[in-house]
Amino acid sequence: MSVLKIGVLASGRGSNLQALLDACAQRTIPAAVAVVLSDRPDAYALVRARQSNVPAYHVDPAAYTGKEQYERELVRLLQAHGVELVCLAGYMRLVGSVMLQAFPRRIMNIHPSLLPAFPGLHAQKQALDYGVRFAGCTVHFVDEGMDSGPIILQAVVPVLAGDDEEQLAARILEQEHIIYPRAVDLFARGKLRLEGRRVYILD
Ligand code: GAR
């Protein structure tokens, strides 16, 4: 089976990137991480990529005249590495039209809530403050909105009495590391069909 080339965008510690790197290395999924890009020079995701011998670049948004110029550079690097699917993994910026047009229906994101509940920052804290009994995570295709695109997979975890933000985030993260590689696997094997905002999983 041919291997899908993925490009990962990350702003921080990169544990979801690691889950994808591991799944690719173990051949659990027919994919390979071709390049990792970060908007932050100190992102640990860049270190993880290099440890796996994956090219990794810091692209500084402040070095460009605007978001479009910045995203043109991202697209240039992604295309130069033959990327077919872009995975946002803790990438803390809204994706703009340049990226969306370059990779139509080919950008995924993982978010630590059961969307459409609690989009945006500090999703786990939002869930705790709201008082929900169940929280979770979502992998979705990216559109022009904030955490608003068609949902591919979700996983649910209970909110336990006495949970603080850190405990809940850790329980959710464990599931993130399971469902993100699974979603990439489905995409790589051509098992996802998008109709409107519904994603069908073919068997
Ligand atoms: C993850 O919990 C991810 O779902 C979240 O940031 C964390 C990144 O962790 N993403 C968002 O909140 C995007 N809206 P990681 O760097 O260890 O993968």
Image (tube, helix red, strand yellow):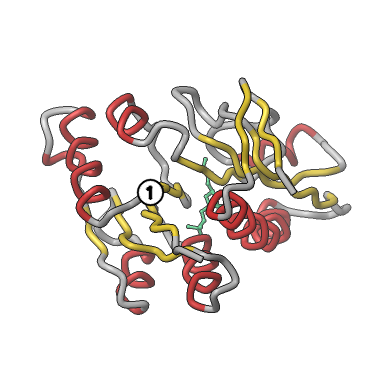
104 up-or-down from 23: above or below: above
Left or right: 142 in relation to 50: right
Q: Amino acid at mark 1?
A: Glu
Q: Residues within 10 Å of mark 1 (few under 14, many from 20)?
A: some
Q: Is residue 198 above or below residue 158?
A: above
Q: Quadrant of residue 111?
A: top right
Name which residue lies at 44% across and 23% down. Answer: 144
- Counting from the top left corner in percent of width and height, residue 16 is at 52, 60
Give the image location of residue 141, x and y in percent.
54, 36
> Circle 1 sits on which residue?
84
Where residue 168 sits, quadrant-wise, is bottom right
Q: Nearer the viewer, residue 183 or 203?
A: 203
* Residue 38 relative to residue 136: left or right: left
Residue 97, horizontal then vertical, whole percent: 32, 24
Left or right: 127, with 31 as reference point? right
Please tell me whether residue 190 is drawn above or below residue 30 in the rendered image. Answer: above
Q: Which residue occupies 34% across, 79% down?
A: 51
